[in-house]
Image: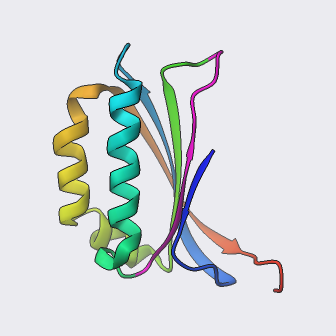
Amino acid sequence: MEHFEKQATPGQKYGILVEVAVKDGKMEDFMELAREHFQRQLDGREENATLASISVPTDEHPNTLRFFEQWESQADYDPAHTESENLKVFFGAAESLMDDVSLKQFDMQHFTFDS
């Protein structure tokens, strides 16, 4: 797993789980684009994005990648993230490398060690 984090604060948050089926032979290229996307997402361009993780492919599912992403609120995800230039750049570069994408959205409670 690769983890990207801007801030860890306890409380009510909003998250998504994304599963991506990557085309054969394109995982390395896709992983690089995902890393760049999350670095931009958490460098301040998406103000209330808090963290993201990439669950790397397994031997059983070598073409499947999963993301977990978290924002302070649903509005920080949609429309702030869904209409962001960062997401447009990512999909513009990565769309041809994907076979399928599924998305689950949910409210969540984030805990930190000291909360």
Foreground pick, 4 / 17: 4
Does residue 85 lie above or below 48 as drawn? above
Where residue 56 appears, x then y in whole percent? 57, 35
49 magenta-colored: yes
25 magenta-colored: no
Where residue 77 appears, x then y in whole percent? 38, 69
For residue 99, side relative to residue 66 (left or right):
left
For residue 78, side relative to residue 84 (left or right):
right
Q: Residue at x 50, y 80 (%)?
A: 72
For residue 5, side relative to residue 97 (left or right):
right
Q: Residue at x 63, y 81 (%)?
A: 12
Which residues are the magenta region? 48-60
Q: Quadrant of the C terminus?
A: bottom right
Where residue 7 appears, x then y in whole percent? 56, 80
Task: Tell me how many marks there are.
Answer: 0
**Quadrant of residue 28 within the rendered picture:** top left
Which residue ends up furthest to the right in the rendered image?
114
Colouring rule applied to residues: rainbow
Q: Residue at x 69, y 74 (%)?
A: 109
For residue 68, side relative to residue 36 (left or right):
right
Where residue 10 appears, x then y in whole percent? 69, 83
Q: Quadrant of the N terminus?
A: top right
**Quadrant of residue 102 within the rendered picture:** top left
Q: Residue at x 34, y 22 (%)?
A: 26
Foreground pick, 31 / 65: 31
Does residue 56 lie above or below 15 as drawn? above
